[in-house]
Image (tube, grey):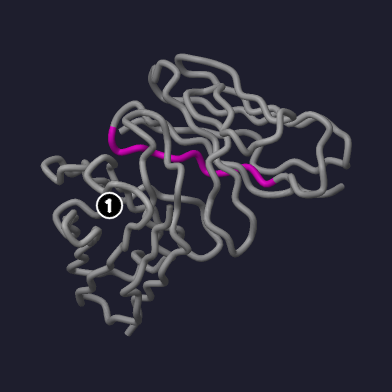
């Protein structure tokens, strides 16, 4: 199975800051990577697919990059509604494994 | 477009449970459906997937041989049959729609809670 490793596990930031989250795959997955946002008590929400494609209802302050084994989710000008936990998921090969999550907290 | 899970319950270790996922607002046979679970206070774990036609199924190693997945497109339903349940299967179980192969899960249900305890 492909292992997905996210870093950091958590990050404290202020409104207006830029935050970057890393996701590394144990083997190459081309660009088959998705990012999800999850708020407490809610189901996850798909925000980025195929590494860099933004879902239509997601603000442009979110961006994704990378290919192969190394990927990054960047949130610029952090807004109050962005404080949540973010997960990467490889969609290259079943099982479609998730990273362990990164919690973005208010500083 | 909506997915609604049901069937979660409190079950003893070794028991069985069948979860259902009701699909609406789209053509079921056009989309693969996946199950993802989240143990209390933990991250997301991909569990199982089934193709739109139902001919291909996939499982995480942690549930292989114990869980089966099926679908009835005529009734807009997907099922997760869980046998040999263990305490570590305790989680909220979500069903989710795969946009298309390799793209990610774009629509999720609200989740159904499975608790395994004696």
- How many labels, in total? 1
Q: Residue at x 52, y 56 (%)?
A: A43
Asked whether residue A100 is drawn in magenta, I would say yes
Describe residue B80's horizontal placement relative to residue B104 as left or right. Answer: left
Describe residue B32's horizontal placement relative to residue A7 as left or right. Answer: left
Asked whether residue B36 is drawn in magenta, I would say no
Q: Residue furthest left?
A: B55
User: Disc 1 on helix, strand or loop?
Assistant: loop
Q: Is most of the magenta stretch helix, strand or loop?
A: loop
Describe residue B84's horizontal placement relative to residue B113 as left or right. Answer: left
Q: Is residue B11 above or below residue A2?
A: below
Q: Is residue A38 above or below residue A26?
A: below
Judge by depth and name the residue closer to the eye, B100 or B93.
B100
What residue did someone put label 1 on?
Answer: B62
Q: Residue at x 56, y 33 (%)?
A: A55
Judge by depth and name the residue closer to the eye, A29 or A81.
A81
Question: Disc 1 is attached to a residue of which chain?
Answer: B
What is the quadrant of residue B15 in the picture?
bottom left
Quadrant where the C terminus of chain B is found in the figure: bottom left
x and y percent of residue B33 in the render? 30, 47
x and y percent of residue A82 in the render? 74, 45
Q: Which residues are magenta?
A: A94-103
x and y percent of residue B66 in the render? 17, 60
Tell me if mark 1 has few (under 14), some (14-19) or many (20+) residues whose alpha carbon lies within 10 angstroms of its own. few
Q: Residue at x 20, y 74 (%)?
A: B16
Judge by depth and name the residue closer to the eye, A53 or A8.
A53
What is the quadrant of residue A3 in the picture?
top left
């Amino acid at each position: 199975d492909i292992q997905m490793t996210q870093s950091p596990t958590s990050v404290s930031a202020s409104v207006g800051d830029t935050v970057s989250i890393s996701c590394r795959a144990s083997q190459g997955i081309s660009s088959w990577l998705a990012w999800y946002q999850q708020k407490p008590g809610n189901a996850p929400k798909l925000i980025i697919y195929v590494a860099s494609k933004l879902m239509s209802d997601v603000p442009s302050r979110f961006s994704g990059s990378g290919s192969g084994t190394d990927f990054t989710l960047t949130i610029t000008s952090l807004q109050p509604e962005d404080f949540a936990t973010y997960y990467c998921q490889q969609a290259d090969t079943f099982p479609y494994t998730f990273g362990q999550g990164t919690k973005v907290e208010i500083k | 477009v909506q997915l609604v899970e049901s069937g979660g319950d409190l079950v003893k270790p070794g028991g069985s449970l069948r979860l259902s996922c009701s699909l609406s607002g789209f053509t079921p046979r056009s989309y693969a459906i996946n199950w993802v679970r989240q143990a209390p206070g933990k991250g997301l774990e991909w569990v199982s997937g089934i193709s739109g036609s139902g001919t291909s199924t996939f499982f995480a190693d942690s549930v292989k041989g114990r869980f089966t997945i099926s679908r009835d497109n005529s009734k807009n339903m997907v099922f997760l049959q869980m046998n040999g349940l263990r305490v570590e299967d305790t989680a909220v179980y979500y069903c989710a729609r795969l946009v298309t192969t390799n793209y990610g899960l774009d629509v999720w249900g609200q989740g159904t809670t499975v608790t395994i305890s004696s």
